[in-house]
Image (tube, rainbow, N blue to C red):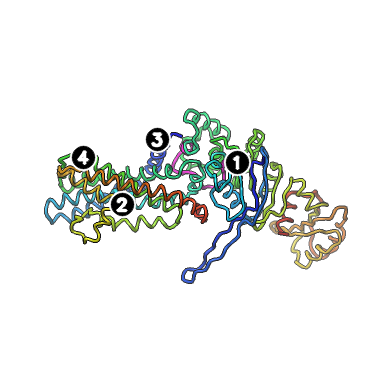
Amino acid sequence: MNIARLLLIGTWLQLKMRSRSAFDGLLSIIYPLFFATTVFLMFRAGRPDALVYAAVGASAMGVWSAVSTTASTALQSERRQGTLELLVASPTSFPLIVVPITVSMAIGGLWSLVATLLWGRWVFGIDVHIDDPVGFLAAAVATAVSIALVGYLLAVSAVRYRSAWALGAALELPVWLICGFLIPIADLPSWVKPISWLLPPTWGVAAIHAAAAGEGPWLEIVMCLLVGLAYAVLATLLSVRLLRSARSAATLSLT
Amino acid sequence: MPVIEVATLRRSYRARTGVLKRSSRDVEAVRGIDFEVERGELFGLLGPNGAGKTTTIKMLITLLLPTSGSARILGHDVVDDPREVRRRVGYVFGGDRGLYERLSGLDNLRYFCELYGVPPREQRQRIGELLELVGLTGRESERVEGYSRGMRQRLHVARGLLHRPEVLFLDEPSIGLDPVGARELRSTVANLVQGGTTVLLTTHYMFEADELCDRIAVIAAGCIVAQGTPHQLKSGVVEGGVLEVEVFGVRDETVAAVGAVRGVRSVAVEERGQSQVLLVNIEAGAEVSGPVLNCLGGVRVGKVITREPTLEDAYVELVRDA
């Protein structure tokens, strides 16, 4: 079995499915703009550098929201349409089936990053000056990939627990705060910081900020990818157990 | 060596009720069943809704773990060796679900080709063959959401055959199909069996089982209550003939009186619109038409037919006694 081909075709078909719902498509286009508008209006009264900070944060919010809520509902949708059992009944390793689903979401999330920055520039006149464009691009991609890997963990948990789809929704807003999307981590209580460091978006946002300021984002990028990888390893190990548990508890189907 | 070996297979569920005051109980869906299916055989699993047919199939295709007992497909244990089992089996179920609605039929098949490791060079040809087989050639580029129920079912069949499975599980595959579509499906299944594929079929259509199956197991309340060829089942349960009497407004006491007639093995009432039909199973050699009609004095009687027993008669008898 050609794994790269499987991942590529899986991702392509997932993107195709997601692009074919006019409603979903429209929401994914305008949703990030609502985040951006809210944040820009809130921060407009403050210092100009705060507005730039908010622009980067709002773009990361879009990526995170696109993945966190949809990743955990993705497998519930598969369950609802009766395809989850068929996926599990195939001889392909389950992680290879789930990863394209979350990668397609992260690609959708990258759109929200770009849309937020363009919206800020065109509508609010915020010029996010980027000192290190290569680093910025690498940081954005690393953030999207690592968030996709967190989404992978959320998605895998939905195999066993039918109500796990709510997990992503429950995590959506706390992560905005904990990962320093809008408020610097330095301003958070000290006991929150270790939790922030365990979440890849924290490192991703820090990398994006560092690249924009020309401060060298590579350490943050590596940390972002390493923490994301840890989630992927955890999800892969858990997937074996959760799948077996789902076969035992009969939760692969709706009834 | 049998292709499918099932030994004292058991599966129970925990059913939960209540919101504030929660309680749970164990429900035994399959209660220690045994059967074997030989290579190239078409084996039918018949039973009423909730009898345990789908649960049995799901254990055999590794979607559910048995509570106890064992099952092996082509020598591979469904619990210890699920991947080897999955490589060799195909699964098709009836109904509208189980397809990616927003993708075309072709994309659905492409995706499952990848999942089942069909070599890329063979995919185009294999998909083309199967589209031809199920009569979807020319419609494959349309999105599944626009397919009729019959087209979806045919796409399911094509999907299940992509990797040329040695064993095919068909769970009520003809449900919702029109008569022509159902006939074509039966013909496809018969051809597969002729080609050496082993098939386990569940269906509610007795004529379908009678026409297709080499052997049948009747399952009721999680237990196998009878097993054999369609002929063995018919002759084992309904030795004599069946007397069908069309009546209008028959009462329970009258039915009981018919059941008590000497030579009558059992009697069942089937509602057919305005009328009912008494289905009277007769012991071999008994002549009961006169006494049965005598019992129906005062009841308006329509057509009276004596006929050979069908698989449905045997099935009804077996399931009712279970």
Chain of residue at mark 4: A
Image point (21%, 48%), residue name: A206
Kindly tell me whether residue A119 is visible in this rendering. yes
Query: In the drawing, does residue A213 fall left or right of residue B144?
Result: left
Q: Closer to us: mark 4 or mark 2?
A: 4
Badge 4 and badge 1 in a common chain: no
- Front residue of this view, candidates A114 and B178: A114
Contact, mark 1 vs mark 3 (Cβ under 8 Å): no
> Which of the numbered marks, if any, corresponds to residue A4?
3
Q: In this rendering, is residue A123 above or below B253?
A: above
Q: In the image, residue B38 lies at what x, y percent?
A: 68, 40
- Compare marks 3 and 2 and give the one earlier in the sequence: 3
Q: Closer to us: mark 1 or mark 3?
A: 3
Contact, mark 2 vs mark 1 (Cβ under 8 Å): no
Badge 2 and badge 1 in a common chain: no
Q: Amino acid at mark 4?
A: Gly
Image point (79%, 61%), residue name: B300
Q: Which residue is mark 1?
A: B168
What is the CA distance from the residue labelled 1 to the residue labelled 3? 29 Å
Q: Which residue is mark 4?
A: A135
Range shown magenta:
B89-111
Q: Amino acid at mark 3?
A: Ala
- Compare marks 4 and 2 and give the one earlier in the sequence: 2
- Front residue of this view, candidates B85 and A119: B85
Badge 1 and badge 3 in a common chain: no
Q: Closer to us: mark 3 or mark 2?
A: 3
Q: In this rendering, is residue B30 above or below B185?
A: below
Quadrant where the C terminus of chain B sits is bottom right
Q: Amino acid at mark 2?
A: Ser
Quadrant where the N terminus of chain B sits is top right
Query: In the drawing, does residue A148 fall left or right of residue B1?
Result: left
